Image (cartoon, grey):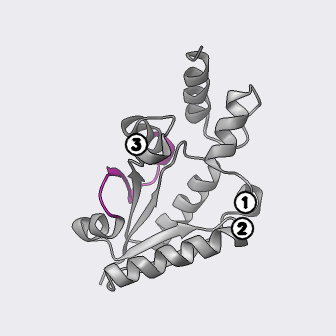
Amino acid sequence: MPAVAIYPGTFDPITNGHADLIERGARMFERLIVSIAASPNKQPLFSLEERVALVNEVVSHLPHVEVRGFDILLVNFAKNIGANVIMRGLRAVSDFEFEFQLASMNRRLHPQIESIFMTPAEQYGFISSSLVREVAKLGGNIGPFVHPKVEAALAAKFSARP
């Protein structure tokens, strides 16, 4: 069976750590679908459409990578698009407990879908979308942490705010 994986997240915004995992995942799977959760409860800075567009910009050079938004239960989304693997990133040991719970629940809900965990390259292990947003909001240099298109989108968001 060909391995089709999804890499789910909010990606608000996509960081170089996310991009690192996407590039490495694209080499592992026949298809990798970056699955962007609507996540209205998180009150994302970027709309779902904006996040999909930004991720598409960052991964456009990867031929077997697709980007899709979703607003349903993750395992149902995976099943609907024919994915049999959920790829998740772990930055630190502190991420593991939550991710372990998610993987266990997902396995319980849909046993045919496997979860795998990947760690980002060492230079990206500390980067998170929330930290990038905070640094950008306060006028710091986020260039080393995000794609130039993401940097420009964050600058535009924060310059438009009162």
Residue at the extreme left of the image, as rendered: 80
- Residue at 47 percent across and 64 percent down: it is 26
Label drawn at residue 141: none
- Residue at 22 percent across and 66 percent down: it is 80
Q: Is residue 31 above or below residue 150?
A: below
Residue linked to disc 2: 92
Residue linked to disc 1: 125
Residue linked to disc 3: 52
Cα–Cα gap, marks 1 and 2: 7 Å
- Residue at 40 percent across and 52 percent down: it is 37
Q: Is residue 69 magenta?
A: yes
Labels 2 and 3: the sequence-earlier one:
3
Which quadrant does the C terminus fall into?
Answer: top right
Which quadrant does the N terminus fall into?
Answer: bottom left
Observer-nearest of 38 and 146: 38
- Residue range in magenta is 57-73
The amino acid beneath tag 2 is Ala
Q: Is residue 129 above or below residue 136?
A: below
Labels 1 and 3: the sequence-earlier one:
3
